[in-house]
Image (spheres, grey):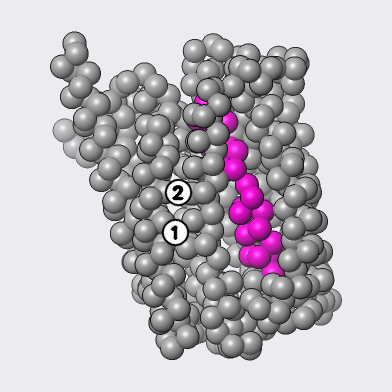
Amino acid sequence: MSPFSKIISIWQEDSLLRRILKNSSYLFSSSTIGMGLAMIQSILAARLLGVAEFGLLGMVMAFASSIYRLLSFRIGELVVKYGGEYLANDRKDRASAILKAGAFTETATSITAYLLLYLLAPLASEYIIKDPAATLFIRYYALGLLANFVTGSSAALLQLSNHFRSQALIGLGQNIITLSIIAYAYFSDGDIWLVLTAYLAGKVFFGLSLGFWGLHRANELLGRGWMRARFNLLPPRREFWSFAFASNFSGTVNLITRDSEVLWLGFLLPGEMGKISAGYYKIALALINLILMPINPFIATTFPEIARTVGEGAWQKLKTLLKRLTAISALWTVSVGVFLLIAGEWLITLFYGAEYAPATPAALILLIGFGTANILYWNRPLLLSLGMPTYPLKVMVLTGIAKIGLSFLLVPQYGYLAQATLMSAYFVVSVGLIVRKGLREINLRAELESKQT
């Protein structure tokens, strides 16, 4: 059988893969266009502000997002995990209780996060960003948190009901609004305030639109009385909150070890050098996003399907799905990786300008780690679906501690290139260990079930 015939055969036989690819296509189409718009946003903002002020912008936005994520319970994962199981068993009353608990928790988190950001802004300005002007920037940009009060719950509900198209369109609308304002700022010689306004307006639109649409779909899927669901329908308290706190702590670990790189650069390097390094690093991450672009939608669409398959105990079906998803993500990641290896510096200097050329080595180093995580993107959703949320957490904590410890030793001496190297090593080691555990667990459960039958 020819390779093409084999692909056609797989497509016809594997309904699960077809559903994932179909749902991903909505998000992929949006994210492809959105990524193009985001790249234009980044290019215009970088050229307008210059390296140091662009780095300042990145640190302000990262700090505001970090505080929210620090308090967040990653409610979307909790709603997908338990809501998916209950809907599969036609227990809409229990799924309603899950969504209600998620929405209430998120709303309280958003308000608390804004108040905390308001209070911490002066400290962040003095000790991390090292620029007194950042206090007002942080307090202003943080207003977006109040509009994103049920984003995670709404997105999870749309995933469970296979309404990915509307989620994609909302994300696209956010990028269009942000780009429009940044373009105006660029051509009218605007300043950092106008650029921040652009990103804030996009966040407000996204949060309010997703919240409204998610709650509307909840009425259709669960019935108009879903908000009256009793909390005693939730899973056993210890199990439920153990998952929630483990997921939250996992997000906190990711935040500290993986998603706050520009803040670490600002903290570990002196004033202006920290801003410039953050600017280079932000550009390197923008280039790496070319690899992440089509795979990110798969995460949202794959998690519910993995959870359903685990719930059914279809282990061979699950292993086949993981192999095929890995092949798809590897094909894209390797292809784009080779392209960036050859043309990365040319792309940066062409679009961002020669002053951003030093970002190229960081982008190539990050390519190794992000490429590994991209190919094996299903690693953590698999263990969450298997009911093992603490193992990824342990791995990330241990590897994260090593990464941060080495950052204090190496970054002050070798700068942002050391940060990029440690980031890549963190991904390779942590993802490798999580994948190995997940595959072993699948084989173990399949073997136990075969013996019982």
Q: Mark 1 points at which residue?
A: 291
**Residue 397 falls in image quadrant:** bottom left
Image position, residue 414 (x, y; %): 42, 86
**Residue 352 makes an appearance in the image:** no
Image position, residue 376 (x, y; %): 34, 49
The residue sitting at 36% across, 44% down in the picture is: 391
Query: Would you say 435 lies left or right of 304 here?
Result: left
Residue 280 vertical placement versus 24 (above, below): below
The residue sitting at 54% across, 54% down in the picture is: 252
Q: Mark 2 points at which residue?
A: 295
Q: What element carries label 2?
A: loop
- Tell me the amino acid under the disc marked 1: Ile
Q: Contact (CB < 8 A) between labels 2 and 1? A: yes
- Identify the magenta region: 60-83
Q: How far apart are marks 2 and 1 (CA)?
A: 8 Å
- Residue at far front of view: 238
Residue 92 vertical placement versus 339 (above, below): above
Residue 78 vertical placement versus 236 (above, below): below
70 drawn magenta: yes
Q: Quadrant of the N terminus?
A: top left
Q: Quadrant of the C terminus?
A: top left
Image position, residue 450 (x, y; %): 18, 18
